[in-house]
């Protein structure tokens, strides 16, 4: 706020430049919830994050991904049942 008050033109211009550097909208797939492991990228597995992942593995905090052969479909009462 101090930068905006001291030099509003410079602050506005710098915010415009930063806005151009940000990624654009994700589209419809951006509205779907995803778990953390589904959102990993090369950046999230960078050398800077290695100590975090190592500590999580040492403390058994890394959940194993389980891929089900039969997808579950929520029923009307909130419980899940196998489809198919």
Image (cartoon, rainbow, N blue to C red):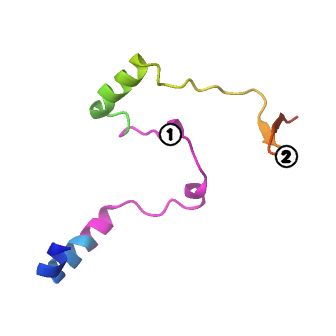
The structure residue drawn at horizontal position 28% and vertical position 30%, both measured from the top left corner, is 47
Q: Is residue 2 above or below residue 50?
A: below
Q: Position of residue 60 (x, y in %)?
A: 46, 19
Q: Residue furthest left?
A: 6
Which residue matches tag 2?
77
Gap in Å between the C-alphas at discs 2 and 1? Answer: 27 Å
Q: Residues within 10 Å of mark 1 (few under 14, many from 20)?
A: few
If the image is split into quadrants, where does the C terminus sit? top right
Which residue matches tag 1?
36
Q: Position of residue 79 (x, y in %)?
A: 81, 40
The structure residue drawn at horizontal position 60% and vertical position 60%, both measured from the top left corner, is 28
Asked if the magenta segment contains residue 55, the reply would be no
Work out whether residue 23 or residue 51 is closer to the camera in this orientation and state it.
51
Q: Residues within 10 Å of mark 2 (few under 14, many from 20)?
A: few
Work out whether residue 37 or residue 74 is closer to the camera in this orientation and state it.
74
| Residue 26 located left or right of residue 33 | left
Q: Is residue 63 above or below residue 22?
A: above
Q: Say what secondary structure mark 2 lies in.
A: loop
Q: Position of residue 34 (x, y in %)?
A: 57, 45
Give the number of the mark in front: 2 or 1: 2
Q: Residue furthest right?
A: 84
| Residue 78 located left or right of residue 2 | right
| Residue 51 located left or right of residue 78 | left
Asked whether the beta carbons under mark 2 and mark 1 sit within 8 Å of each other, the answer is no
If the image is split into quadrants, where does the N terminus sit? bottom left
The structure residue drawn at horizontal position 35% and vertical position 22%, both measured from the top left corner, is 55
Q: Say what secondary structure mark 1 lies in.
A: loop
| Magenta region, residue range | 16-43
Q: Position of residue 26 (x, y in %)?
A: 51, 59
Q: Residue furthest top?
A: 58
| Residue 27 located left or right of residue 54 | right
Mark 2 and mark 1 lie on one chain; the one further toward the N terminus is 1
């Amino acid at each position: 706020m101090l930068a905006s008050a001291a030099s509003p033109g410079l602050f506005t211009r710098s915010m415009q430049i930063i806005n151009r550097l940000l990624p654009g909208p994700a589209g419809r797939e951006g509205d779907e919830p995803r778990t953390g492991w589904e959102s990993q990228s090369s950046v999230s597995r960078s050398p800077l994050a290695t100590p975090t992942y190592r500590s999580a593995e040492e403390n058994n905090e890394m959940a194993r991904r389980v891929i089900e052969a039969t997808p579950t479909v929520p029923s009307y009462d909130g419980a899940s049942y196998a489809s198919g």
